[in-house]
Image (cartoon, rainbow, N blue to C red):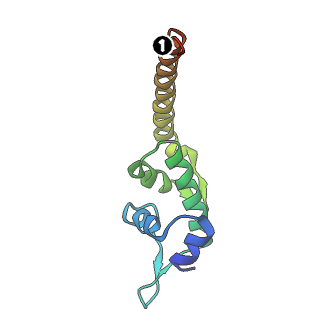
Amino acid sequence: MRIGELSRRTGVSVRALRYYEEQGILSPDRRPSGYREFSAQDVVRVEHTRNLLRAGIGTSLISRIVGCMQDGELLLEDCREQLLVERRRIDQDLRTIGAARDALDALLDGTVSS
């Protein structure tokens, strides 16, 4: 499939798909005409990429993680440590956000409504 079709199937803009390619997340084949040729596995790879981006993982790590993917599935034995590092980072971010929310709640509890 060409890039426009991949965009329609995934809901991701053509511009973003080109960016993913620049970052090494996608590696489409090229037709003799120069057009990119994407596979059904690229649809899965884009979906994984979107999920990882939503989790706060940057494209540089995502490009390393997708290198551990085969047939659209993560091979955790190859990427486990990288994923654990990111999970610990996300856990810390959640603790920080929770502490900030608690501080705001304490301030709000001390305010007087007008």
Give above or below for 13 relative to 2. Answer: above
Task: Please identify the quadrant where the N terminus is shown.
Answer: bottom right
Position of residue 19 in the picture relative to residue 5 (left or right): left
Residue in view at x 46 percent, y 21 percent: 100
Residue type at mark 1?
Leu
Relative side of 74 to 25, left or right = right
Which residue in the rendered view is the most extreme toward the bottom?
A: 33
Q: Secondary structure at mark 1?
A: helix
How many numbered discs?
Answer: 1
> Residue at coordinates 59% horizontally, 58% vertically from top-left?
47
In front: 12, or 40? 12
Which class describes the residues within 10 Å of circle 1: few (<14), some (14-19), or many (20+)? few
Q: Quadrant of residue 16?
A: bottom left
72 in relation to 96, above or below: below
Q: Position of residue 20 (x, y in %)?
A: 43, 62
Furthest residue toward top: 110
The structure residue drawn at horizontal position 45% and vertical position 51%, both measured from the top left corner, is: 62
Residue under numbered circle 1: 107
What's the residue at 47%, 67% (across, down)? 17
Residue 99, x across and y down, in percent: 48, 18
Decide: is 98 above or below 90.
Answer: above
Q: Position of residue 70 (x, y in %)?
A: 57, 59
Residue farthest to the front, as pictured: 114
Relative height, residue 105 to residue 93 (above, below): above
